[in-house]
Amino acid sequence: MTQPRSAQKPANDLTPVLDAAVNDTLAYVRTQDPDAGAELADLRRRRLTRPEVVVVGETKRGKSSLINALLGVPGLSPVDAAVATATYLQFVPGPAGARAWLPGSADPVDIDSLAEWATGAQRARRIEVSHPAPMLRYVSLLDTPGVGGLDPAHTAVALAAVERATALLFVADASAPLSGPELDFLVAASERVDAVVFALTKIDGFAGWRRILDDNRALLRAHAPRFAEASWFAVSSTLAELAVEAGPEEQAALVEASKIAELQHALVELAGRGHQLQLANVLRAARGDLLRLQSAAEDTVRAVEADPVRTAQIRAERAALAARKRTESRQWTLLLSTETQRARVETVGALRTRIAAVQQEFSQRIDAGRGEALAKLPEQLDAELQAVAVQLSQQLEDTFAQVGEKVLASVFDESERAAMLGRLNASLRHAMDAAPPRDGSADNLLIALSAGGIAFMAGRGAMLGASVLAVGGGLLIPVAGIGLGLAAGGYVLYRRRVQTDRQQARIWLRDVLGEARAALADEIANRFTDLQYALSVAVDDAVEKRLRDLDAHIAEIDAAAAEDAAGRAKRRAAAQQELDGVRARLRAADAALSRARALTPAPHDEEDR
């Protein structure tokens, strides 16, 4: 790699501006909403050990090929293969190698065939690929599954990975303009990540790529105005790969035609501004809280006006919710109980079928095996039982998502669910803290439920295999992780009983699998109990909180109506002052974020305009 442009033309340090804006915004949010302020403070305290660029985009847009080109290592990230639903690849500096984290496991396993693991033949939550590529000295890259295509869970995994991003590299290709799912994903992903670099790939294969680029800019102006003037890096990974293998005479021309070097330099520049980008990300997240507080302040201003129509609407909403609580709470409870019981029975049935298949397969191995083949049976069964546990974890995630979505949809409409997710989180955190840990539950999983789609995310900060599930993005439910393998006693019993006796081997197999099925069935029952309890607490608390909010709003209206003209004017002035205050802080945050756009590098041809 050549010297980064950041070393040639240093950017202005925006740290004081962003730091002041973050401090002011956090202080204000903390006074208005202590819970939201605490979450922002936690986000601010995260230490940035190494800037990380998360690569996102639709399937088949050339993300993996682009990563290989950026690192100068053809074939490092698997290309042109079916992508695993819940797997993403993290590229870090170090000796060449790879290791994977399985669901429910805190310890990684070394892997030989990266393509096999990355495409889901072996199920992993995260795969870490280390390589001495020069670019990784500056920044880590994270390759996510596609954000659309046939499996929408890809979108959820990519959104989960975005949570740890210093910046995003959004990849589109020159074959067609941005699609609706791509634009939707971009809007969702950029709520907490401020810096987004856009790359248009495959320019060598499509002569009309400039027209596609213009179309993309027009689409962004219409659907994501924040990125209307964003810079695009038009590149060819194919030409970059050819340059790696070409001789000295052709190499320079291919590198120039690929335009990869400019994108490399841009990402290195971003890495050098990591602390400023982190502050901008905190401010971007805080902006969402300011918008919510602005909406609440506007409601207060309307309440002071004591508008008869608005008053009637609020009273009707309050009466309807209270009536639903009285008449439908038993239905909600019954639905939750019915859905969890149905899902539990289905899951146990699936487990029984899976264990029966394992027993049949290994019985056949016993019948056909002899000597060394029989001696290896315990190790093979251990691996198979671990695979059963991994598959069961994935099935439980899918099942919990379906149950949670159905129950929440029966209680709240779409707009209510979107408004209450933050409150539901607070209720569930309290329940999680108050509940005593179950034996063997040290490696907890988190299941997140909310109002949108389903997301599978690596969790617990360090993201060491603990999985997180989201139904749209945020309601947390604690359940213990599943880990299953052949206990040491199983090996001892095998050696004592079996040796070369096939009949004893069959008996041993039946006993071991019976114990495994019982252990997993108990774990399934415990998990569904956790799910039912957490959802029940969340729904009750959310309804009560909404009623209290409506009561407070009605009280404000009644108090304003009881005042004389002077009293109402005083109330109106106070409410307007609060609204003006949050609007002023929102303008200040936007001004700082506008200046932060300078942190995202542009290609040379755009800089020269």
Image: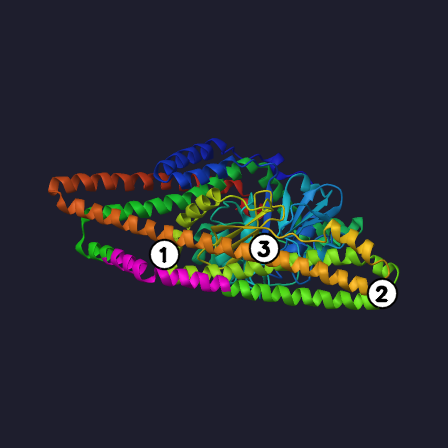
> Which amino acid is tagged 3?
Glu
> Which amino acid is tagged 1?
Glu
Q: Select label 2 or label 1 by which is in front.
A: 2
Marks 3 and 1, how far apart in space?
Answer: 33 Å
According to the picture, the residue beneath numbered tag 1 turns out to be 416
Question: Which residue occupies the extreme left position in the image?
Answer: 564
Task: Give the x, y percent position of residue 92.
Answer: 68, 43
According to the picture, the residue beneath numbered tag 2 turns out to be 369
Does the magenta segment cover residue 458? no
Marks 2 and 1, how far apart in space?
Answer: 61 Å
Task: Give the x, y percent position of residue 211.
Answer: 54, 61
Question: Which residue occupies the extreme right position in the image?
Answer: 371
- Earlier in the chain: of badge 3 and badge 1, it is 1
Any mark on residue 523, and which? 3
Q: Which residues are magenta?
A: 316-341
Residue positioned 81% across, 65% down in the render: 503
Please tell me how crowded label 1 is: few (under 14), some (14-19), or many (20+) other residues with Cα within 10 Å. some
Question: Is 394 placed above or below 569 here?
Answer: below
- Earlier in the chain: of badge 2 and badge 1, it is 2
**Closer to the camera, 97 or 513?**
513
Task: Give the x, y percent position of residue 423.
Answer: 39, 48
Q: Is residue 236 visible?
A: no
